[in-house]
Image (tube, rainbow, N blue to C red):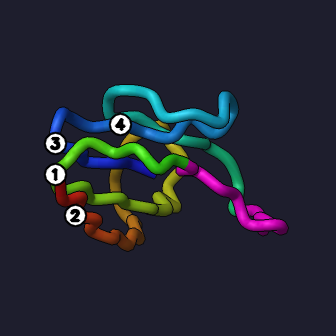
C-alpha cells in the first residue's frame, strides 16, 4: 500500500501497523485473507490537497517491484 500525498510518498508498514515516509514494500509473503478487513487509515485530519492511494500485489516475491504486478488506486481530494 502506497500513498502519493501532496508532500511525498508514504507506504503502509504492515508489521508496525502505521504509515511511514518513502516508497517501500508493505509486506512480503503469500497472499492471505484479511478477515476482518484491515483498517489502514483512521483519521479526520488530512492536509488539503490530492492523495492517490494504491494497493498492489507483485506476484514475483523477490523484493523488487516487477511483473506480474496487479494494482488498483483511489484518488482522494481534501478541500479547505
CA distance for labels 1 and 3: 6 Å
Asked whether disc 1 touches disc 2, contact meaning CB atoms under 8 Å apart, the reply is yes
Asked whether disc 1 touches disc 3, contact meaning CB atoms under 8 Å apart, the reply is yes
- Callout 2 environment at 10 Å: few (<14), some (14 to 19), or many (20+)? few
Magenta includes 27? no
**What x and y, as percent, mark residue 67?**
35, 62
Q: Mark 4 = which residue?
A: 10
Figure check: 58 above or below 7: below
- Callout 1 environment at 10 Å: few (<14), some (14 to 19), or many (20+)? few
CA distance for labels 4 and 1: 15 Å
* 23 or 19, nearer to the observer: 19
Q: Which stretch is magenta?
A: 32-42
Judge from the rendering whether residue 51 lies leftward or rightward of residue 55; answer left or right.
Answer: left
SS under mark 1: strand
**What x and y, as percent, mark residue 62?**
50, 41
Q: Which mark is residue 49?
A: 1
- Callout 4 environment at 10 Å: few (<14), some (14 to 19), or many (20+)? some
Judge from the rendering whether residue 9 lies leftward or rightward of residue 6; answer left or right.
Answer: right
- Earlier residue among tags 3 and 2: 3
Q: Foreground mark, 4 or 3?
A: 3
> Which secondary structure is most common in the magenta stretch?
loop
Magenta includes 40? yes
**What x and y, as percent, mark residue 59?**
52, 61
SS under mark 2: strand
Judge from the rendering whether residue 23 lies leftward or rightward of residue 12; answer left or right.
Answer: left
Q: Residue 77 carries which label?
A: 2
Amino acid at each position: 500500500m502506497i500513498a502519493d500525498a501532496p508532500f511525498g510518498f508514504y507506504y503502509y508498514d504492515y508489521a508496525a501497523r502505521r504509515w511511514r515516509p518513502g516508497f517501500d514494500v508493505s509486506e512480503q509473503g503469500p497472499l492471505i485473507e484479511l478477515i476482518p478487513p484491515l483498517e489502514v487509515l483512521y483519521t479526520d485530519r488530512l492536509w488539503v490537497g490530492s492523495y492517490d492511494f494504491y494497493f498492489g500485489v507483485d506476484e514475483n516475491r523477490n523484493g523488487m517491484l516487477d511483473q506480474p504486478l496487479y494494482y488498483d488506486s483511489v484518488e482522494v481530494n481534501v478541500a479547505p
